Image (cartoon, rainbow, N blue to C red):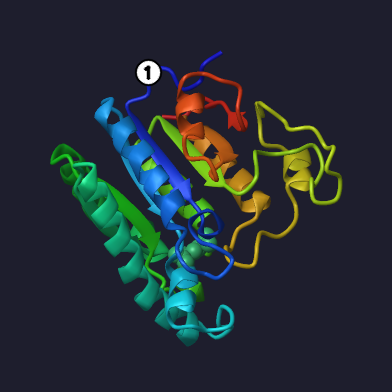
Amino acid sequence: MNYFANIRRIVVKVGTSTLTHDTGKLNLRRMDHLVRVLSDVRNRGIEVILVSSGAIGVGVGKLKLPSKPHDIGGRQACAAVGQCELMYIYDKFFGEYGHTTAQVLLTRDCVDDPRRLSNIRNAFDRLLDLGALPIINENDTVATEEIEFGDNDTLSAVVARIVKADALVILTDIDGLHAENPKQNPDAPLIHVVEEVTEDTRRIAGGAGSSRGTGGMYTKIIAAGQATREGITTAIIDGSTPENLYRLLEGEEIGTVFPARGGC
Ligand code: GLU
């Protein structure tokens, strides 16, 4: 069954571990592939909204720091440096494929306040009407604990709801949700379809992510649960080969799919 037939608007989330090398520097070849695939999907007539992490990771690399700073100020500084670099590259690559990018940086207070939420919705509507391709990140430079999303998996589900997307695809560094943690049991089978995110799903998704990103499988499952409850079909697929997105859209059994449940 193709859960992604007839979609018109898709939110794609890509994490730091997919966008960067172990050095923290951008994986340009991967980014180029990703941008080419997203541009092509856009050319097919599907509106694409990209939620991209990587600001802090790229800032760490650019500032030649040995690791991600632990203090908020340090992380904010890295994000300020890294976000520029990230958008510079996206703009250049998408430009080469004929698309115009738009940077949107959000914090939780933006979406909790009804008036600001309506402003954001209007801005997205206009950007999409104008044919721009929005690229969203958390505004890490101003985000402190009270106003942060914490991870871009949660942010991607929020954005998918705001733009009333038909689908959310989370690209990550693993091929989907396994019945057990594959780092502990490499034979643990991949789960192809999760009809409902339950306590059991959350339990098997437990555990941390990589050192460069923030969320692990757990936050992706939570995001999938939130999105599907809003009527948005969600998938978690391996982003190391961005062409996997074509396979998903063509109905191939790839990654883990969370079919939409009722919703708007
Ligand atoms: N917003 C953070 C960044 O761009 C990443 C959050 C996450 O890893 O989910 O660096």
Can you tell me whether the CB of the residue at mark 1 lies under 8 Å from the nearest atom of ligand 1? no
Residue 132 or residue 139, whichever sits in front = 132
Visible residue check, residue 242: yes
Considering only vertical position in the picture, is 185 above or below 59? above
Give the side of residue 193 with respect to residue 94, left or right. Answer: right
The image quadrant that residue 166 belongs to is top left
Amino acid under disc 1: Asn
Residue 177 or residue 57, whichever sits in front = 57
For the residue labelled by badge 1, is the local secondary structure a helix, a strand or a loop? loop
Q: Measured from the top left, where is residue 149 in percent x and y?
A: 48, 62
Please report the residue visible at 25 percent of the width from the left and 50 percent of the height from the top.
118
Q: Residues within 10 Å of mark 1 (few under 14, many from 20)?
A: few
Considering only vertical position in the picture, is 138 above or below 59? above
Please report the residue visible at 47 percent of the width from the left and 50 percent of the height from the top.
14
Visible residue check, residue 151: no
Query: In this figure, which residue is indicated by the disc labeled 1?
Result: 6
Considering only vertical position in the picture, is 246 above or below 239? above
Q: Measured from the top left, where is residue 187 in percent x and y?
A: 85, 37
Split into 4 quadrants, where in the image is the C terminus? top left
For the image, the number of numbered tags is 1
Outermost residue toward the top in this view: 1
Give the side of residue 238 with respect to residue 207, left or right. Answer: left
Residue 121 or residue 191, whichever sits in front = 191
Split into 4 quadrants, where in the image is the N terminus? top right
